[in-house]
Image: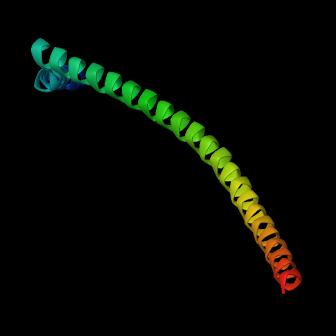
Amino acid sequence: MAELFLDSEIAAGTQSGEEAQATAAGPATLAVSVDEFAALEERIRRTVELVKRERQARTEAEERAAKTEEKLQAQSQAAQKLQSELSALRAERDQVRQRVERLLTQLDALEL
């Protein structure tokens, strides 16, 4: 019985040794060289910087768009005001023209 216990311990020890070798081999196959890791780190750093720049550019573009929209709204209101003023001036010109024509007609009637 002692021999069976001893054999099972040896077998367990052998399995533990094999597992240790497999575990040691696992990270070795997943290991990345220092140069590859540094290159990956540099690519990530550049990507982060690119994202930061793009976000900044987007924020600036949105601010410019908002300011331009405000200017457009103000100019649109000014254009509407000028259009209504122009319509009023044309109406006044027509009234003055009609008055002048009536006066000229009355003058022509007096000369006859």
Q: Quadrant of residue 32?
A: top left
User: Residue drawn 77% across and 71% down?
Assistant: 97
User: x%, y% of residue 48?
Assistant: 34, 24
User: Residue drawn 85% across and 77% down?
Assistant: 107
Q: Nearer the viewer, residue 22 or 46?
A: 46
For residue 54, side relative to residue 87 (left or right):
left
- The figure's colour scheme reads rainbow
Residue 58 lies, with reference to residue 14, above or below; the image says below
Q: Nearer the viewer, residue 28 or 2?
A: 28
Q: Nearer the viewer, residue 35 or 77?
A: 77
Q: Quadrant of residue 21?
A: top left
User: x%, y% of residue 15?
Assistant: 17, 26
For residue 101, side relative to residue 78 (left or right):
right
User: Residue drawn 69% across and 49% down?
Assistant: 78
For residue 27, side relative to residue 68 (left or right):
left
User: x%, y% of residue 24?
Assistant: 15, 19
Q: Quadrant of residue 88?
A: bottom right
User: x%, y% of residue 103?
Assistant: 85, 74
